[in-house]
Structure formats: structure tokens, C-alpha cells
Amino acid sequence: MIQCKICNREIQLIISFGKMPIANGFLNAEDFHQEYFFELACGFCEHCKTFQLLHQPDRSQMFHEQYAFYTATSKHMSEHFEVMALNYIQHWLVTQKDPFVVELGSNDGTMLKHFTKRGIRHLGIEASQNVAEIAKKNGVETKCCFFNDTTAKEIQQSYGKADLISVANVHFSNMGEVARGIALLLKDDGIFVFENPYIGNVIQNVAYDQIYDEHSFIFGLNSVSYIFGCEELDVFHVETQETHGGSMRYYLCHKGAHNKRSSVTELLHQENDVLCLNRMEIYRTFAKNCERQKQELVALLKKLKAEGKSVVGYAATAKSTTVLNYCGMGPELIPCIYDTTPIKQGKYSPGMHIPIKPYTIDWYKKVDCAILFAWNHAKEIFDKESEFTKNGGQWILSTSCLQ
Ligand SMILES: [Zn+2]
């Protein structure tokens, strides 16, 4: 029997994507022999309504000194976090005296630096040493640790309780401990903001590449309400976000501390009565759609190869790892992936070992088709790469969501 990671009840397998490496585990050729794999399988719990990975990979394999994702390298995400920080300051902190802001998974300090600049008390919690060091160099106060109820108590003793706790695109396997920690650390009238890729978008768009080791859970309003409700925290407002191909921002507080807004009842209606995200059948259909999409993509790449077309990958995202490994597409179908992130360049993609080449201004010169793994930034990229399409180049999207 497999147990739900949230409520411990029995959970059924929805889909297995097979043997999978760590999504951000870009590696050198000499390390191929010791690459770490786990089974990427998902289930949906009918009790707490949480879509989740059934097998947790070893966390020490996921967050370590070589962790390859820096928020600041994405212009789009930098802008998103600036807007987020200003929104916090203007709407939630302006009336507070000497407010204290905590961010979990603060990465390189991209969001918190806006508080540093304004002299607002803050603390970032970041598990990866290398990104935490960059944040510190930028003047962002950062503690390098995993967040749980014990670290929450330590923070409270040193800094006091938080007016605002922000968590965006951070994925915990220990949700129960995290929820307890947040309930402990949050002031009576404080606000906890939780933002993640939204299950509704993943299911509707068949965006199965959102499923990888770091995304232990893919949340909806039902599951967020259940998880934090166990610690007497309530969702009082929600806002949809365009980031990561469709995200949801949940605002929570201690029960009764803020008035519940209509956005919450509207989303609940959408989830339960329109999208039926509370029902198992939806997830069974999703599994079939993933399989169909895989077959279509592999068939397309084989056809292009047979026609003698040159195909490359564009953007070696974490998401690409799920697509490439699930579809079994290696260098024979995609000879290289161009990427702008220095730490990935010269390395190989996790599992399928496609060489990652440095992005150059004329990357597209001898390329007929490029498979876009950063489809969530499609508009930004299509604009930037207009020369590619002018030269007759064709984009292929790694999942069919935008086609
Ligand atoms: Zn459950």
C-alpha cells in the first residue's frame, strides 16, 4: 500500500513516468556512471485532494552545492518577484510598524533584495549553500537550512514573529512540518503567501513536465486548504498568476484573522464543479493524455530526422528532464540543447545525456527545428528569436499545451 504524504491514507497510482534522474542534475561525462535515479510516479489522494509524487527522491541529491537554478538568471522571474515584493509592501506591510518578512526558498535573494533596499527587516531561508551565499553577498540576510517547526522556533527566538511569510515555487516533501512551522512563526494578524504551479493548468494543458523531483506536490485550493487547515490556517484570498505556465497565489492567515474574499469561493466552484479536480477520473484522463502526447512528440522527431532536418533543444529547463526521459529522447533525436545558464553549459542533460551548448547569437543558423522546453516563456522567447522563424525555422513545443 502506498500512503498519501499528506493524510497517510491509501493512495492510487495515476501514472508512472518511469526511471527519472534529478531534474536539475546536469552532469559531466565522468559522472554518468554514478547518476541517481528514482521512479517518477504520481497519485491523487481522494481524501485530501492532493496530487503528489508517490516516491520521494533523496533530498540530498536535489539541493546541494551545485544546484543549478538561480532566480536572477530569469529576467521574467526577476520582474515577477519585484512586482510581488512591491505588492507586499504597498498592500500588506504599509500599516505595520517595523515589519518582519520571511521568505522560504529565498534562492539568490531576488525577491528579498527589494526589502533590503528599503531597510525592511527580512530573513531568507534557503537549503542550497551556493545560492544562499550569492544572496548574502547581495546584502540579503539568509539562513541556510531546511524549514520545519524546529527552525521556525529558532527564527522566532532570534527575530520575533513574522508579519509576512512568502513561499513561491518552493517544494517541500515535509508539508506537515512546514505548515506547523508557519503557524508558529506567523503573527496573529500576519499573512502567509503560498504560490505554486496550479494543478488546474497542469491537468488542462497536459503540462506533465511540471512533474519532477522538486514538485513533490502539485496543489489546488482544495489541497492547500486541507494541508494548512490542519494547523488552523485559512485561505482568505487567491490570485491567478501567469508564471510557470499558470500558477495560483494563496493568501492564508490564522483562522478568522482576515475576511474571506469572494475569490476563494469562486475558485472552489471552478475546481469542484467546472474542472472536477476533486475527482479521480480527471486524473485517469490526464494519464492517457500524457501517453498520447509522448507518442506524438516522438513520432514527430523521428519523422523530422528521417527527412534530414536538423533539430536542437532550446533551454535546458528542469521541465525538459521529465519530457526527455519519459519520451526516451536522447542525442540521436536531439543532438544538443542551447542554454544561457553558464553552470549548465558544457555539461549533459540528466538521464538522456544530451550535450548542453552555450547559447550564441547565431545558434539558429543551421537549425530547421527547435524544441522549446521553456514553453512557459514562449512569448518572450518567440519575440527574442524572431530571426529564427524569419529564416524558416520552426518551433516545436515540448508539451502540446500551446499548440
Ligand atoms: Zn491525502
Image: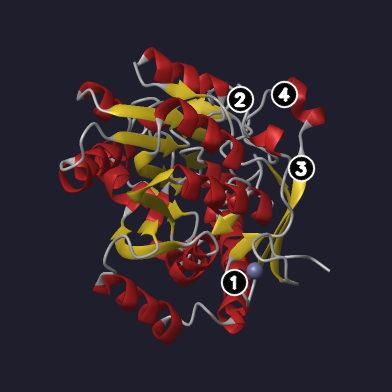
Mark 1 within 8 Å of ligand 1, using the beta carbon = yes
Mark 4: is the Cβ under 8 angstroms from ligand 1? no
Read off the residue under disc 2.
Answer: 347
| Ligand 1 positioned in quadrant | bottom right
Q: From the Cβ of disc 3, is ligand 1 less than 8 Å away?
A: no
Q: Quadrant of the C terminus?
A: bottom left
User: Residue, x 22% and y 47% (percent of image)?
Assistant: 92
Q: CA distance from mark 3 to mark 2?
A: 18 Å
- Cα gap from disc 4 to disc 1, whole angstroms: 43 Å
Give me the residue at 34% from left, 65% from top: 256
Residue that carries the numbered disc 4 in the rendered image: 29
Q: Which mark is residue 113?
A: none
Q: Amino acid at mark 4?
A: Ala
Q: Residue at x 38, y 50 (%)?
A: 192
Q: Look at mark 3 in the image and give the residue it sits on.
A: 37
Residue with the mark numbered 1: 48
Q: Which amino acid is tagged 3? A: Phe
| Disc on the earlier residue, 4 or 1 | 4
Q: Residues within 10 Å of mark 1 (few under 14, many from 20)?
A: many
Horizontal relation, residue 17 to residue 222: left or right: right
Q: How many numbered badges does the structure rendering display? A: 4
Q: CA distance from mark 4 to mark 3?
A: 16 Å
State how far apart marks 3 and 1 are (Cα): 28 Å
Q: Quadrant of residue 290?
A: bottom right
* Residue 238 coordinates in the image, percent (x, y): 32, 63
Kindly state the secondary structure of the residue where label 3 is placed: strand
